[in-house]
Image (tube, helix red, strand yellow):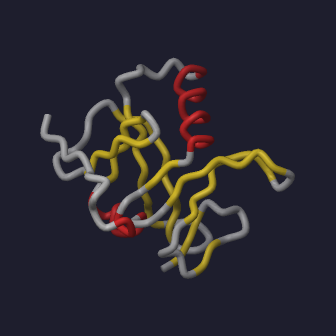
């Protein structure tokens, strides 16, 4: 398995981060859905959504050849090269407030976002 562990000393604007609250929720989801501990979180983007691009959260057993592999808040995270371009500097958070419960992407690259917060444009 060819892994690239992202170094914290890299340019901070290129690093994807996860808040402790989001990491806690990801761990809960893994347990509730009986996802093996060995599976990592895959963060990505795909075309679509009201603003042009949509965020993708999934679990994956192994990284792909060109993935960047992060160790964040005790979680292994995979990001493919195309998604890395759009997610550089992004922080994944989790909100359980009045406006709803769910993951929140704080993405400095997003020129516009939709009302639901699940899609963005550049």
Residue positioned 22% across, 44% down in the render = 64
Question: Residue lying furthest right in this view?
Answer: 98
Q: Whole-percent x and y of residue 15?
A: 37, 60
Q: Whole-percent x and y of residue 88?
A: 39, 66
Residue positioned 40% across, 44% down in the render = 42
Q: In which quarter of the image is the N terminus?
A: top left
Q: Relative to residue 59, is residue 106 drawn left or right?
A: right
Q: Whole-percent x and y of residue 108?
A: 51, 73
Q: Which of 119 and 47 is in front in this view?
A: 119
The image shows residue 8, relative to residue 76, as above or below, that is: below
Number of numbered callouts drawn: 0
Residue positioned 56% across, 22% down in the render = 33
**Image quadrant assignment for residue 99:** bottom right
Question: Residue lying furthest left in this view?
Answer: 2
The image shows residue 85, relative to residue 103, as above or below, that is: below
Residue positioned 18% across, 41% down in the render = 3
The image shows residue 30, relative to residue 101, as above or below, that is: above
């Amino acid at each position: 398995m060819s892994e690239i562990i992202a170094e914290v000393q890299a340019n901070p604007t290129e690093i994807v981060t996860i808040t402790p609250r989001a990491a806690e929720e990801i761990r809960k989801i893994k347990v509730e859905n009986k996802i093996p501990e060995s599976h990592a979180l895959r963060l990505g983007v795909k075309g679509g959504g009201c603003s042009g691009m949509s965020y993708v959260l999934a679990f994956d057993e192994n990284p792909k050849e060109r993935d960047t592999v992060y160790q964040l808040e005790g979680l292994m995270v995979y990001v493919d090269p195309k998604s890395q371009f759009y997610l550089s500097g992004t922080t994944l958070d989790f909100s359980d407030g009045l406006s709803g419960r769910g993951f929140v992407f704080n993405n400095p690259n997003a020129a516009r976002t939709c009302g639901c917060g699940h899609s963005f444009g550049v």
